Image (spheres, rainbow, N blue to C red):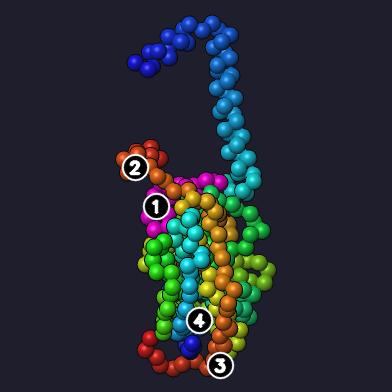
Amino acid sequence: MLSLDFLDDVRRMNKRQLYYQVLNFGMIVSSALMIWKGLMVITGSESPIVVVLSGSMEPAFHRGDLLFLTNRVEDPIRVGEIVVFRIEGREIPIVHRVLKIHEKQNGHIKFLTKGDNNAVDDRGLYKQGQHWLEKKDVVGRARGFYQDNRSVEDRNYLFLILEL
Amino acid sequence: MFTSRKNVEDFTGPRERSDLGFITFDITADLENIFDWNVKQLFLYLSAEYSTKNNALNQVVLWDKIVLRGDNPKLLLKDMKTKYFFFDDGNGLKGNRNVTLTLSWNVVPNAGILPLVTGSGHVSVPFPDTYEITKSY
């Protein structure tokens, strides 16, 4: 079996080779982390890549698709944009489109969102008494998209793991 | 295009009395050139942009449509009513002469960048100075 072969290889290595392999592995993990952090800095978003979790933006995005986000503060929020936002007190980010904006002279903006595939706007999703979203609720703006081409079984497996 | 306006409690959200605008419109568009090999669908939307005393910039999506690859790219829509209620945040529609309607679209690729494009044409719509008393929408 695969796991037993791996253990045999480890036993065959002397201490130095083992440490070398551990260091190699550490380098790979560090590089991956650096790339991820680098992306966070470049895009300005705490989650530069997100997975679409629901069907509320179909037929454009389906569950499992990837979205690439930026969150530059200078980018103004305008209608038609796809924003990823978090409702106060909730963990799960939502990916919907901006339907209405009202911006004051000083730059303070309040806006309303709606999922393409939903019949109504998101007011029902916001916090009790909350009618608008503000800049602080935004995690990022969707700038790029990659479709998930895996089979349904593979996709469901991924969601099982994500939910854990 | 035909516009009129009422002052009603914004029943879709905050319950202050706000201006509610009604617009009827026609759209003629040929989207064929936008669909290239990488375009999966277009999200087309008609939005109104205007300034009021309360807010320096307001944008409201009045109508939208999803055009999939393979759908008829030539649109000929007449006497359309807005899909969404055109509520202002306040009473800024009354007598507002400078409400600009533009048609824009979000290109959804098979993979890649999601651009937002605004059409070059736009229409300015003036709102009347008075409110409509009764109206059946």
Crowding at mark 3 (Cα within 10 Å: few <14, some 14-19, many 20+): few
Q: Mark 1 — residue?
A: A62
- For the residues labelled 3 and 1, the Cα–Cα distance comes to 46 Å
| Circle 2: residue type | Ser
Question: Which of the chains bears the disc numbered 3?
Answer: B
Residue at 57% of width from left, 69% of height from top? Answer: B118
C-alpha separation, residue under disc 4 versus residue under disc 3: 15 Å
* Quarter assignment of residue B90: bottom right
Question: What label does residue B129 carry, if any?
Answer: 3
- Front position in the image: B132 or A50: A50
Contact between marks 4 and 3 (CB within 8 A): the answer is: no
Residue positioned 60% across, 66% down in the render? A109
Q: Rounded to the nearest whole Å, what is the CA distance between mark 4 and mark 2?
A: 49 Å
Q: Residue at x 61, y 34 (%)?
A: A34
**Magenta-colored stretch includes residue B69:** no
Q: How many marks?
A: 4
The verdict on residue A57 being magenta is: yes
* Image spot of residue B52 (x, y percent): 61, 80
Residue on which disc 4 sits: B18
Identify which residue, B106 or A17, lies in the foreground.
B106
Label 4: which secondary element: strand
Residue A151 circle label: 2
A132 is higher (above) or lower (below) than A136: below
Q: Would you say residue A160 is visible in this rendering?
A: no
Whether the residues at callouts 4 and 1 have beta carbons within 8 Å, the answer is no
Disc 4 marks which amino acid?
Answer: Ser
Mark 4 surroundings: few (<14), some (14-19) or many (≥20) residues within 10 A: many
Give the mark toward the camera: 2 or 1.
Answer: 2
Residue B98, located in which quarter of the rendered image?
bottom right
| Chain letter for the residue marked with disc 2 in the picture | A
